[in-house]
Image (cartoon, grey):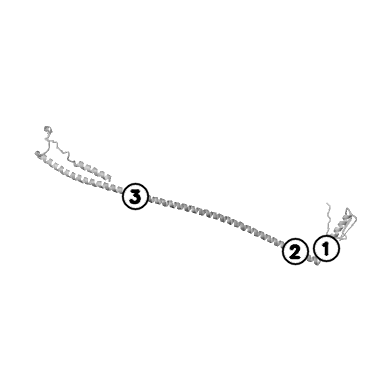
């Protein structure tokens, strides 16, 4: 590797060249000179000119500035500071503007969100109002149907009541008719009982007459048989046929008939 030789500019004491040989002498006299050879002489001239110009700038930077230069530098520093402040102010304004725009965007986003939410709530409110109107209409219809049903029920009840009243009146008429029939039957029964009583009296009279006839032969109404000899018994008893009237009512049969009639009337009632 080729070493790179370097040293500060302040340590150079002299720079010169002789033909193509270029010599740099350091301040330290004990130190060896730095020597190199250029391919042409004009290259050494250019290197020397560059070194002289660089040394002049080096010395100028280290000399104290004049008042004009100091004023110019101060003015330049002030302008630089002013520009820096202006730049910082501009950056602050830009940052503030960006923050304001960001807040504005946030506010706009919030307003848009609130508007959407309000619109949604308004839609929900409209839907709820529509639902309420439909429910009210259904309630009104149900109320009307209920009133109609109650009216029909009242009408049916009135009709049933009227029908029941008619049936009751018919039953009352039937009961009255049956009562009339019963009264007639009672009257007939009473008459029949009177007839039975009369017949019983007649029967008693007949029995008495028959008894009288058996005890008094010349007054009996018994028909003799043509074959009297056949009717005589060994023990001396005499048998005769009694003549009866078919028009005489049998009291026992009449009582049985009256009892059956009364039972049928009771069943009808």
Q: Comparing marks 1 and 3, which lies closer to the viewer?
A: 3
Relative horizontal placement of residue 119, taking residue 55 as reference (left or right) = left
CA separation in Å, label 2 and label 1: 23 Å
Report the front residue among 262 and 191.
Answer: 191
Q: Is residue 221 above or below residue 5?
A: above
Which residue matches tag 2?
79
Q: Earlier in the sequence, mark 1 or mark 3?
A: 1
- Residue 202 x, y percent position in the rendering: 15, 43
Q: Earlier in the sequence, mark 2 or mark 1?
A: 1
Q: Comparing marks 3 and 2, which lies closer to the viewer?
A: 3
Which residue matches tag 1?
60
- Residue 150 x, y percent position in the rendering: 40, 51
Residue that appears at 22% across and 42% down:
257
Residue that appears at 32% across and 48% down:
166
The secondary element bearing badge 3 is classed as helix
Residue that appears at 80% across and 66% down:
68
The secondary element bearing badge 1 is classed as helix
- Residue 231 x, y percent position in the rendering: 12, 33
Residue that appears at 43% across and 52% down:
144
Any part of residue 35 in sight: no
Q: Earlier in the sequence, mark 3 or mark 2?
A: 2
Which residue matches tag 3?
162
The secondary element bearing badge 2 is classed as helix
């Amino acid at each position: 590797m080729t070493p790179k030789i370097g040293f500060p500019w302040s340590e150079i004491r002299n720079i010169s060249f002789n033909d193509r040989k270029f010599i740099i002498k350091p301040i330290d006299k004990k130190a060896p000179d730095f020597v190199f050879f250029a391919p042409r002489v004009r290259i050494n001239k250019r290197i020397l000119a560059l070194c002289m110009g660089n040394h002049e700038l080096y010395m100028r930077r280290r000399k104290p500035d004049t008042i004009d230069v100091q004023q110019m530098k101060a003015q330049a520093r002030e302008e630089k500071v002013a520009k820096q402040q202006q730049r910082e102010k501009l950056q602050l304004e830009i940052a503030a503007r960006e923050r304001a725009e960001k807040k504005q965007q946030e506010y706009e986003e919030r307003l848009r969100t609130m508007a959407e939410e309000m619109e949604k709530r308004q839609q929900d409110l409209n839907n709820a109002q529509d639902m309420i109107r439909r429910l009210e209409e259904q309630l009104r219809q149900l109320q009307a149907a209920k009133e109609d049903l109650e009216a029909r029920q009242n009408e049916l009840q009135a009709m049933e009541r009227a029908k029941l009243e008619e049936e009751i009146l018919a039953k009352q008429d039937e009961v009255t008719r049956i009562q009339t029939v019963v009264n007639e039957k009672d009257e007939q029964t009473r008459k029949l009982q009177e007839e039975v009583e009369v017949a019983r009296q007649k029967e008693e009279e007949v029995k008495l007459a028959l008894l009288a006839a058996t005890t008094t032969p010349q007054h009996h109404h018994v028909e003799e048989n043509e074959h009297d000899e056949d009717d005589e018994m060994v023990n001396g008893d005499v048998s005769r046929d009694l003549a009866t009237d078919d028009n005489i009512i049998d009291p026992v049969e009449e009582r049985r008939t009256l009892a059956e009639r009364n039972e049928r009337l009771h069943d009808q009632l």
